Amino acid sequence: MNRLAGLLTNDIAIDLGTANTLVYIKGKGIVLNQPSVVAINRQTGKVYAVGSEAKAMLGKTPDSIAAIRPLKDGVIADFEVTEYMLREFIKIAQKKRHFVAPRIVICVPSGITEVEKRAVRDSAKHAGAREVFLVAEPIAAAIGVGLPVDQPSGNMIIDIGGGTTEIAVIALNGIVCDTSIRVGGDEMDEAIVIYIKKNHNLLIGDQTAEAIKKKVGTAFRLEKEEEMEVKGLDQVTGIPKTQKISTLEIREALQEPIQAISDALKHALEQTPPELAADIKDRGIVMTGGGALLRGLPELLREQTDLPINLMDDPLFCVVLGTGKILDDFDRYRPVIMKSARD
């Protein structure tokens, strides 16, 4: 029956992220990459927009409209909005209706609780899934970059997303030890907002903070510091103004979330069994996730751990590509599927 169902539908792999949701369809590859944002009418509950269109509304809506990010710290914060968002993304990705509901593989943080697992499964089923399987983000990322996760050798991966940083040592299709902290790109943006407010009396929004992070954000010292102009609201006069911000200031602003990631990495290394630690010393550590794109972060972690840190090409896509590989060869990768309390 499952083989027959597979002929009548397109099975789907989803990287359900705090910042972005990516969808992979079996046989087609990545077909959707959209911000995890939904805009709804507060009075009627009617949905105005999802994805990029909804993200453009963040911080700019009247009281009657709310632009919502339904995931926080890698897990579902708003069940109903997540369900609607998934349904819309699945509809967009599939383009045409199928006779049978799809089987869906979704990646989730390795530190997720049973309640949070149930919320993800239920949201996907209500959004139209026939079956839902969960896989831990570090394992999906490792498979996505081609690491031999089924071998008796240590592979260490750092996946920095919008809401979480996942650090894991993987061997024999399982996580030997892991550290999951709820610090990621969102916390970096928040740190920039707070710093500029405190030091320049300037109020800026999350989207401006994200733009600052991408343009002049650094974790490591630069040979030549850079500057950019930032527009915001002066707290003293209440009038919009422009302020120059340097890479040095943003590096100072990002110190706390970056230190949290560095401390988590050191903690994960301390928990690693000696035999696997030797493998990691030889092979190095792989970095994935959108947060890994912060300039200078691999260099900083390399300096602090004295280990090779390898930033992957297109780190934002590693998790969804790994989830897609699991979907494409499900029998081979069945051992990496998360078990639930009901299994």
Image (spheres, rainbow, N blue to C red):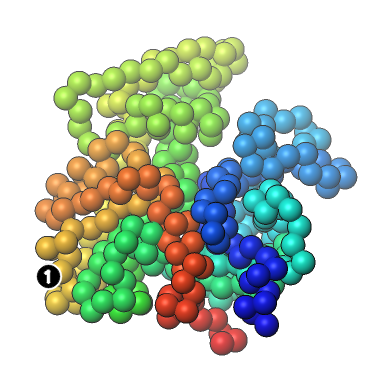
Instruction: Give the residue at x 53% y 19%.
Output: 232
Instruction: Give the residue at x 53% y 25%.
Output: 203
* Residue in the foreground of this view, choosing between 117 and 7: 7
Residue 157 image offset from top left, x and y in percent: 30, 60
* Label 1 crowd bin: few (<14), some (14–19), many (20+), radius 10 Å: some
Task: Residue 259: tell me if it is visible.
Answer: no
Task: Residue 311: tell me if it is visible.
Answer: yes
Instruction: Give the residue at x 33% y 57%.
Output: 145
Q: Which amino acid is tagged 1? A: Ala
In which quarter of the view is residue 26 placed?
bottom right
Residue 130 image offset from top left, x and y in percent: 69, 72
282 lies above or below 65: below
In the displayed structure, does residue 212 sit left or right of residue 32? left
* Quarter placement of the N terminus: bottom right
Q: Residue furthest bottom?
A: 343
320 lies above or below 193: below
Residue 254 image offset from top left, x and y in percent: 34, 38
Instruction: Give the residue at x 60% y 15%.
Output: 238
* Quarter placement of the C terminus: bottom right
* Residue in the foreground of this view, choosing between 156 and 57: 156
* Residue in the foreground of this view, choosing between 138 and 274: 138
Marks counted in the figure total 1
In the displayed structure, does residue 3 sit left or right of residue 193? right
Residue 246 image offset from top left, x and y in percent: 32, 21
305 lies above or below 237: below
Residue that badge 1 annotates: 278
Judged from the image, the secondary structure of the residue bearing numbered disc 1 is helix
